Image (tube, rainbow, N blue to C red):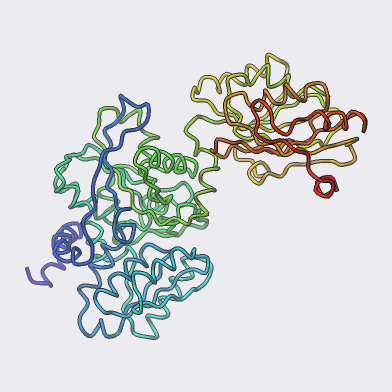
Amino acid sequence: MHLMERDKLPLERRLRQEILFARERVYRFAQPTPIERLLLPNAESGPEIWVKREDLSSVKSYKWRGACNCMAQLSPEQRARGVVTASAGNHAQGVALAARTLGIFARIHMPRSTPKVKQNAVRLHGGEFVQILLTGDSYDDAVMAAREDERTSGAVYVHAYDDLQVMAGQGTLADEVVLSGHGPFDVAYLQIGGGGMASASADWLKTYWPDIQIIGVEGVGQASMKAAIEAGKPVELHDLDIFCDGTAVRKAGALPFEICRELLDQIVTVTNAEVSSAIRVLWETLRCISEPSGAMGLAAVIKDQAVLAGKKVLIVITGANIDFLQLGLIAQSEGSGSAAARTLRVRIPERPGAMLALLDSCFAGLNIADFQYGLHHAAEAWPTFTVTSDHAAMLSALPERLKANGYEWEDLAGAVDVAFRAIPLRSDLLRHPVFLRLDFYERPGALHDFLSRLIRDRASLCYFNYRQSGERIGRALIGLDFDSAESRSAFLNTLPEQGEGYRFCKSLDEATTARMIA
């Protein structure tokens, strides 16, 4: 068909034709990625989940497909002018791969906050054919700079998603799903940033499996396609959550919007906590370390699994380009644990033995994942706990247990002071304090046993800072306050450095103690 005739076709049909042509181009640059089965833990009656592993591509995301397909079609004159683009990481690596393979010089504008690991990956794939320009503090700043570069230099702008050739390249991942022999699927959950991958994949999957349900997945704080569909046109989000940085797009693409509003059956949103939990599931089942946006599809499936029982479900792990430091934050974040969790603080009298009485009466059978407390009132204490359990019913029953034992409490889910571990401690209320570093063996009840065996009725707990890390050894910083210097000395003289249930316990030196209570 002549090019001008193709341009007159409906957008969905044009995109399908371009995906066919892209099939002939993209495998010059990289190889197809596998599709494999994922079994959710403790979900025998749940959906049958299949995962498209775009994280295993040469650039660790699907973005190479669109960039390579687009740049492979540039004319000799356009190649000589070079290309320019803006990216927070994944698209940049795709452009770099294409630039080096095709011998085209590329200038890539990235936000100044782009992690070094992503900058280094771009240089690795592009070599001497790429130049990274760190511009502004956000992706939007980088886009503005890249567009100005395009205007002044004459370089060809390679859009990350709002381009038919880029979209067609992304659609080849759906083509591989169709050709895999694992279909047809009942439902596909496709994450959305600008919408290029979701629109192309939806178009291709519905072509071969008309009855498939396509669910778009967006982060709660970055749902630009949802906003566009509600408004009837792409609109710019005022605030943008960037935890899932690969999908953090303020405004949906115009071309993807036209297709998504016709082909998406539904859009669901997921929270950062749900995404963190899905990242953990991917690690525990597939030993896959996904970037946050790569796990959004699974997060939505886990959220919807009650209505997906017996259905065959497709998800895409869109990428694995995650900064190493972010892994620690995700592992410690609310929702990343495999068990149900609840964060609350409880009012108890400020006297020796009160904390243990609370643990004995209300927290039996629960795992304490986080414990924060600092003395700040002479008569009452408000320790903060994050407790987990494999049995959600036990957590649900906790408020009644607290009420039955006469404790006042409040829910602290999402509290900023808890997240940043702002633990108050009034030094003027201390008499004869001592601070201990405690390393204990992580097992149910270990912390309680230590407090009960060594501290009960001998001192008041004035400080506690503990967070479960996933190691076999738990580490806590504990403050005790004694009635007299003599009782403090007697305690320290009889405290063994090692003992049953704990590996190490030692008081802090005088200088450190002075800093703690200054």
Identity of the residue furthest to the left in this view: 1
For image coordinates 81% across by 33% down, the residue present is 480
In this view, the residue in front, 377 or 327, is 327
In this view, the residue in front, 192 or 517, is 517
x, y percentage for residue 5? Answer: 10, 69
From the image, which quarter does the N terminus lie in? bottom left
From this view, report whether residue 418 is shown above or below residue 124: above
For image coordinates 71% across by 27% down, the residue present is 346
State the image quarter where residue 375 is shown. Answer: top right
For image coordinates 68% across by 22% down, the residue present is 359
Left or right placement of residue 143 versus residue 181 in this view:
right
From this view, report whether residue 342 is shown above or below residue 428: above
x, y percentage for residue 368? Answer: 61, 29
Left or right placement of residue 244 versus residue 396 in this view:
left
x, y percentage for residue 84? Answer: 36, 76
In this view, the residue in front, 410 or 494, is 494
Identity of the residue furthest to the top in this view: 404
Left or right placement of residue 239 versus residue 347 in this view:
left
Left or right placement of residue 184 versus residue 240 in this view:
left
In this view, the residue in front, 254 or 488, is 488
State the image quarter where residue 310 is shown. Answer: top left
x, y percentage for residue 209? Answer: 16, 43
For image coordinates 60% across by 40% down, the residue present is 414
